[in-house]
DNA sequence: CTATATTTGACAGATATTGTCAAATCAATA
DNA sequence: TATTGATTTGACAATATCTGTCAAATATAG
């Protein structure tokens, strides 16, 4: 299963772009982008949006990868991770249904 | 759908305990516990464990409530929340299967 | 009214996040 | 091998978030 960083790196290379070039458009130091691609740092939500645009990746797909990774990483070492995720889905449904603030 | 705070408050009252008493055992200011019960602050994982013990609640159940709430809150305003949660489940499976460091 | 319980909000200290920068490493090749 | 360009690494800074204390305000019961 690919990490978000791997997806970004593969697509950057497929597009023949250097870290420097993408980092420039992203407006961060190359060091940050290097670390994002190797999963040593996580991107911000806004950077993911921008990266999808720069690298011509489907924004929704990349966001799903990114969000799922954040969640999974946060909970992966819990024995009850799967149960918690299932209940989280119900909760999200509930919140969306009642989001009339 | 109940919040973790509601569960805690209900059980505290069912046990006839004051904020002060539970906060004392938890070793935090009553203000914190008051806020936790009203979902104005979140508890820490360790506090949840301790609260389950103090209030005689099933620890796994309370942890699931707590974790699911944390996840749901973090992602609820994403349009792609449900897709992200589904992929997160796959990711957790994958991580657990390959957790040989 | 007074006592006690709870809530509220300002604040402090610790920790986490996000970034910069410079030096080290790697890879290709003249 | 020496040089050049690309990437990685690690120290550090600025900022934001988390977790708690405290005191004052408010609510509740007798």
Image (tube, coloured by chain):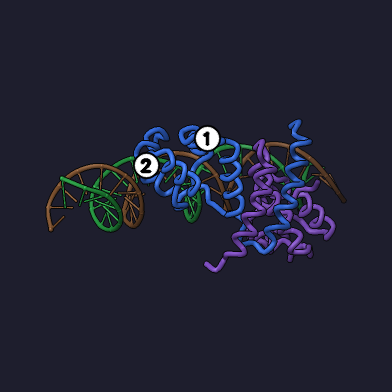
Chain colours: A blue, B purple, C green, D brown
The residue at 73%/47% (across/down) is: A89
Q: Name the residue nearer the viewer: A68 or B39.
A: A68
Q: Is residue B78 above or below residue B35?
A: above
Q: Residues within 10 Å of mark 2 (few under 14, many from 20)?
A: some
Assign a secondary structure to mark 1: helix
Q: How far across and down, in percent of the image, does residue A47 sit?
A: 48, 37
Mark earlier in primary sequence (2, 1): 2
Determine which residue is flagged by label 2: A19
Which chain contains the residue that carries disc 1? Answer: A
Tag 1: Cα neighbours inside 10 Å, few (<14), some, or many (≥20)? some
Question: In percent of the image, x 36 and y 36: which residue is there?
Answer: A21
Q: Is residue A62 visible?
A: yes
Query: With B52 as the anchor, is B78 left or right in this view?
Result: left
Q: Is residue D23 left or right of residue B24?
A: left
Nearest to the observer: residue A10 or residue B31: A10
Asked whether, in this view, residue D1 is left or right of residue B16, the answer is left
Question: Looking at this view, is B43 or B76 the one in front?
Answer: B76
Estimate the x, y position of residue C7 in percent, counting from the top left: 72, 42
Residue B55 x, y percent position in the rendering: 77, 62
Q: Residue at x 70, y 57 (%)?
A: A82
Relative vertical location of residue A73 with respect to residue A56 in this rendering, above or below: below
Nearer to the camera, B19 or A51: A51
- The residue indicated by pointer 1 is A49
* Up-down relation of residue D16 to residue D10 (above or below): above
| SS at mark 2 in the image | helix
**Real-space CA distance between mark 2 and mark 1, rounded to the nearest whole angstrom:** 17 Å
Residue A79: x percent and y percent?
A: 67, 64
């Amino acid at each position: 299963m690919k990490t978000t960083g791997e997806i970004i790196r593969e697509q950057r290379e497929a597009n023949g772009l250097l870290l420097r070039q993408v980092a420039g458009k992203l407006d961060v130091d190359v060091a940050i982008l290097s670390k994002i691609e190797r999963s040593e740092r996580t991107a911000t939500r806004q950077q993911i949006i921008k990266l999808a645009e720069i690298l011509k990746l489907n924004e929704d797909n990349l966001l799903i990868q990114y969000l799922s990774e954040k969640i999974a990483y946060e909970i992966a070492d819990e024995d009850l991770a799967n149960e918690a995720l299932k209940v989280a889905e119900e909760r999200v449904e509930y919140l969306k249904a009642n989001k009339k603030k």
